Image (cartoon, rainbow, N blue to C red):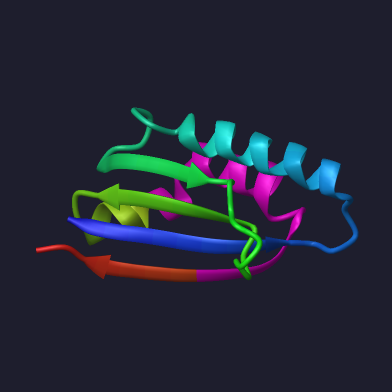
């Protein structure tokens, strides 16, 4: 199994209220990919970060194998959500992909 974890920060130009709405929309849309992408085992978005965090939200997803993760990156439904709900609002992105034995 492959884990795919992303941490994002939102652009500073948004108010706290706007950031909460953006994070909620991202969560709903990314988690809505469950059951739609071959090889995607689980997908969760955590938007309830503590003040000690230096990221605004996190994607935690699992895939059957590396090929499934690679296919997810270019899957039309994922690309639409990323281009519509994530990329326009985020400043930074950090990714960690790793294998779980």
Residue found farthest to the front? 51
Q: Is 18 on the left or on the right of 48, as rendered? A: right
Q: Is 20 on the left or on the right of 37, as rendered? A: right
Looking at the rendered image, the quarter that the N terminus falls into is bottom left
Q: Nearer the viewer, residue 58 or 32?
A: 58
Where, by quadrant of the figure, is residue 97 drawn? bottom left
Q: Residue at x 61, y 48 (%)?
A: 82
In the picture shown, does residue 29 fall above or below 2? above
Could you tell me residue 20's position as x and y percent? Answer: 74, 42
Helix, strand or loop for the magenta stretch, by majority = helix
Could you tell me residue 81's position as x and y percent? Answer: 60, 41
Q: Residue at x 85, y 64 (%)?
A: 12
Q: Is residue 81 highlighted in magenta?
A: yes
Q: Nearer the viewer, residue 15 or 89?
A: 15
Q: Residue at x 47, y 52 (%)?
A: 59
Segment tinted magenta in the rendering: 72-94
In the picture shown, does residue 84 fall above or below 3? above
Q: Residue at x 9, y 63 (%)?
A: 101
Could you tell me residue 100's position as x and y percent? Answer: 16, 63
Q: Is 14 on the left or on the right of 47, as rendered? A: right
Could you tell me residue 33's position as x and y percent? Answer: 45, 33
Q: How many marks?
A: 0
Q: Is residue 30 highlighted in magenta?
A: no
């Amino acid at each position: 199994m492959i884990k795919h974890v992303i941490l994002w920060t939102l652009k500073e130009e948004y108010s706290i209220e706007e950031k909460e709405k953006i994070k909620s929309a991202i969560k709903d849309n990314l988690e809505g990919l469950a059951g739609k992408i071959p090889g995607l085992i689980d997908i969760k978005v955590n938007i309830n970060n503590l003040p000690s965090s230096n990221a605004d939200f996190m994607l935690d997803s699992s895939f059957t194998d590396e090929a499934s993760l690679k296919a997810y990156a270019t899957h039309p439904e994922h690309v639409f959500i990323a281009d519509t709900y994530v990329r326009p609002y985020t400043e930074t992105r950090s990714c960690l992909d790793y294998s779980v034995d």
